[in-house]
Image (cartoon, grey):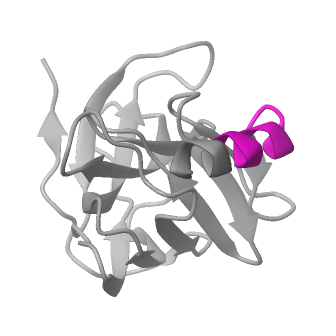
Amino acid sequence: MRVVAGLVLLLSLGAGVVALADGDPPFRRTTPRGSFGRDGPALVVGVPGGRAWGIESGLIPVPAIGTAMHVTMSVEDPAVREAFVRIAWYDRATGRPKQFAIADATFVHADQTATFDVPLDPPAGAVAYRVRVLARLHTPDAISSAAAIRAVLSSPFASTRAMPPTRLLP
């Protein structure tokens, strides 16, 4: 039944690209096996098992130093082990650049809602970033409900909070 609901949602969303509001970057699924939609300001995400899957924004130019994003995320499906926001940093803002660093925000688990700020302080050499809302399931061959994760993301704002650890990738 979950698979059918997910497929219906996928078909209704067409290409699966949704913008938050005018001027905000569009988001897309990181796998065609996932689901993605909107409910007012919330991004609604469903994911298959395996590695971390979800949605990602288009490339966004690096913000001013000391910028953050406010996030409220809830996980409504017990199949989800953890959901989180990841910021991926790039050295180019065009084409299909390869990420060279990532920063993961707070993990949110099934039946939890969390509100937190995600610092957007770029590592040296970054010129663009993507915002990802990702999740991992307990079982690799499972699929979550189409509305497993709900995330409301603010526009970037000036912040003085400390940045999370950023991992430079090989």
Compared with 65, 54 (above or below) is above
* Closest to the observer, 48 or 17: 48
Residue 14 picture quarter: top right
* Closest to the observer, 19 or 10: 10
- Residue 21 vs residue 57: left or right? right
> Could you tell me which residue is drawn at 53 percent across and 42 percent down?
56
Q: Residue 141, how many percent across, how many down?
A: 28, 33
Compared with 28, 5 (above or below) is below
- Residue 39 vs residue 64: left or right? right
Q: Can the viewer see residue 61 in this picture? A: no
> Could you tell me which residue is drawn at 49 percent across and 60 percent down?
64
> Could you tell me which residue is drawn at 53 percent across and 51 percent down?
2
> Could you tell me which residue is drawn at 53 percent across and 31 percent down?
33
* Residue 15 magenta: yes
Magenta span = 7-16
* Furthest-front residue in this view: 1
* Residue 36 magenta: no
Q: Residue 83, how many percent across, how many down?
A: 31, 61
Q: Residue 15, how many percent across, how many down?
A: 78, 31
- Residue 7 vs residue 85: left or right? right
The chief SS type of the magenta part is helix
Q: Can the viewer see residue 123 in this picture? A: yes
Compared with 137, 66 (above or below) is below
Q: Residue 68, how many percent across, how many down?
A: 43, 71
Q: From the image, which quarter does the C terminus lie in?
A: top left
Compared with 139, 164 (above or below) is below
